[in-house]
Image (tube, rainbow, N blue to C red):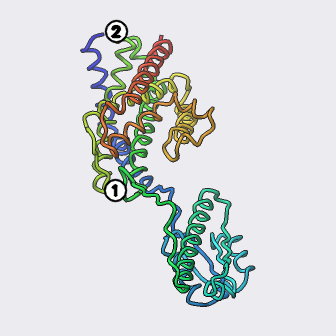
């Protein structure tokens, strides 16, 4: 391999990138815009619109409604006069939750008798419904304990101690901010998309313009040609990750707790795997539109089974196995480990080894396929 010929290809690609200011601006600005938009993705179920049919209209019923609102999961938007109004609101999507408090609610509590409250939840979104039902059950348990304590105190009895006390600690993200979990994952997904699409665009563009064939007849070797096109894209990728990390700290307050050098080194392996995927796609595509469709077919499923939004352990076993051959699966764990936990290579070697192996395999296949395509 001649370093002079390699540098000539790299210089050609850098010149084309600098001349095409619109594309260069898109490559730099689009990841920043995506981070700001996707960084607010959240799996928290907060401020669900709630209608209340309060037939008791008492101090106890108002305290119950306040207890619901204090959790931040319920946002009372109005009152209902009957169950039919609640049903219409849930059918029309104007409300997600309906609370029905019976007329004898306060009287039963004061007398120490069991009191019932109906909470109706729109379960078309099963995840939100499970969270809301769990919170509502917790509120009922807490109020029941408070009532029992008051009844025993009126009788001159001491309430028994709780048989079990569970003490919890939230490590790495004590404030339970969703951005701390989402932003590192968004960083990985953005880099996957940009590097893959960049490699597809560069190679397919050369083929559509007819300049790829002109390069083939020169003394440049296929490996030199491919590396000359890929290395400038890696530089652009590092510019992207630097901007994203700065924005993540300035906008979301997500700082790098671990080694920045380790993150950049691991990102290099991820770049080679994602650029290899883009090169493989470009070698089997006849035009840019077909390459774009294949890229989406490859990248979109990887987001769902890589652990970006929800734990991979909740997926079927077959999809978990598929996720183990995706570079994004391991890179997301590496990024979150370095950014959130601040851990080093001694804790991440189990993700590092598969990521490096996949990078070598994918990029090796891309080189082989690329050589056969241009021969």
Alpha-carbon neighbours of circle 2 within 10 Å: few (<14), some, or many (≥20)? few
Q: Nearer the viewer, residue 17 or 46?
A: 46
Image location (x, y in percent) of residue 89: 68, 75
As drawn, 58 above or below 119: below
Alpha-carbon neighbours of circle 1 within 10 Å: few (<14), some, or many (≥20)? some
- Dot 2 falls on a residue whose secondary structure is loop
Q: Residue at x 34, y 15 (%)?
A: 224
Q: Nearer the viewer, residue 166 or 350?
A: 166
- Position of residue 179 in the picture relative to residue 135 (left or right): left
- Dot 1 falls on a residue whose secondary structure is helix
Q: Nearer the viewer, mark 2 or mark 1?
A: 1
- Position of residue 358 in the picture relative to residue 174 (left or right): right
**Which quadrant: the N terminus?**
top left
Residue that extends furthest to the right in the rendered view of this protein: 84
Q: Nearer the viewer, residue 246 or 6?
A: 246
**Disc 2 from disc 1: Cα separation:** 50 Å
Residue under numbered circle 2: 219
Image location (x, y in percent) of residue 42: 48, 56
As drawn, 210 above or below 68: above
Q: Is mark 2 in CB contact (under 8 Å) with mark 1?
A: no
Q: How many marks?
A: 2
Q: Residue at x 56, y 79 (%)?
A: 147
Q: Residue at x 55, y 33 (%)?
A: 298
Image location (x, y in percent) of residue 30: 39, 47
Residue under numbered circle 1: 252
Image location (x, y in percent) of residue 65: 56, 80
Q: Earlier in the sequence, mark 2 or mark 1?
A: 2
As drawn, 92 above or below 39: below
As drawn, 375 above or below 58: above
Find residue 331 and name its label: none
């Amino acid at each position: 391999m001649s370093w002079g010929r390699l540098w000539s290809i790299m210089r050609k690609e850098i010149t084309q990138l600098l001349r095409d200011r619109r594309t260069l601006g898109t490559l730099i600005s689009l990841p920043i815009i995506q981070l700001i938009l996707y960084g607010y993705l959240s799996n928290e179920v907060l401020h669900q619109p709630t209608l209340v049919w309060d037939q008791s209209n008492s101090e106890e019923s108002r305290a119950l409604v306040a207890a619901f609102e204090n959790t931040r999961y319920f946002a009372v938007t109005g009152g209902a006069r009957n169950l039919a109004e609640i049903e219409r609101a849930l059918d029309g999507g104007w409300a997600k939750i309906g609370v029905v408090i019976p007329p004898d609610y306060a009287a039963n509590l004061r007398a120490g008798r069991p009191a019932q409250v109906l909470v109706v939840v729109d379960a078309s979104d099963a995840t939100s419904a499970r969270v809301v039902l769990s919170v509502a059950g917790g509120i009922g348990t807490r109020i029941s304990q408070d009532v029992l304590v008051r009844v025993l105190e009126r009788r001159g009895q001491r309430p028994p101690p709780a048989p079990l006390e569970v003490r919890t600690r939230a490590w790495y993200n004590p404030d339970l901010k969703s951005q701390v979990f989402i932003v590192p994952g968004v960083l990985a997904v953005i880099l996957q998309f940009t590097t893959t699409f960049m490699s597809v665009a560069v190679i397919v563009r050369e083929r559509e313009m007819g300049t790829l064939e002109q390069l083939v007849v020169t003394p440049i070797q296929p490996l030199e040609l491919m590396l000359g096109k890929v290395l400038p894209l890696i530089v652009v990728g590092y510019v992207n990750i630097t901007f994203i990390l700065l924005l993540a700290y300035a906008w979301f307050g997500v700082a790098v707790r671990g080694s920045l050098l380790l993150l950049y080194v691991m990102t290099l392996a991820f770049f080679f795997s994602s650029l290899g995927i883009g090169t493989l796609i470009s070698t089997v595509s006849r035009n840019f539109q077909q390459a774009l469709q294949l890229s989406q077919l490859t990248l979109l499923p990887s987001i769902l089974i890589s652990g970006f939004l929800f734990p991979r352990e909740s997926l079927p076993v077959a999809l978990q196995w598929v996720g183990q051959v995706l570079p994004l699966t391991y890179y997301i764990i590496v990024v979150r480990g370095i950014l959130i936990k601040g851990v080093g290579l001694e804790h991440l070697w189990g993700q590092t080894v598969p990521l490096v192996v996949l990078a070598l395999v994918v990029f090796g296949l891309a080189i082989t396929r690329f050589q056969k395509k241009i021969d």
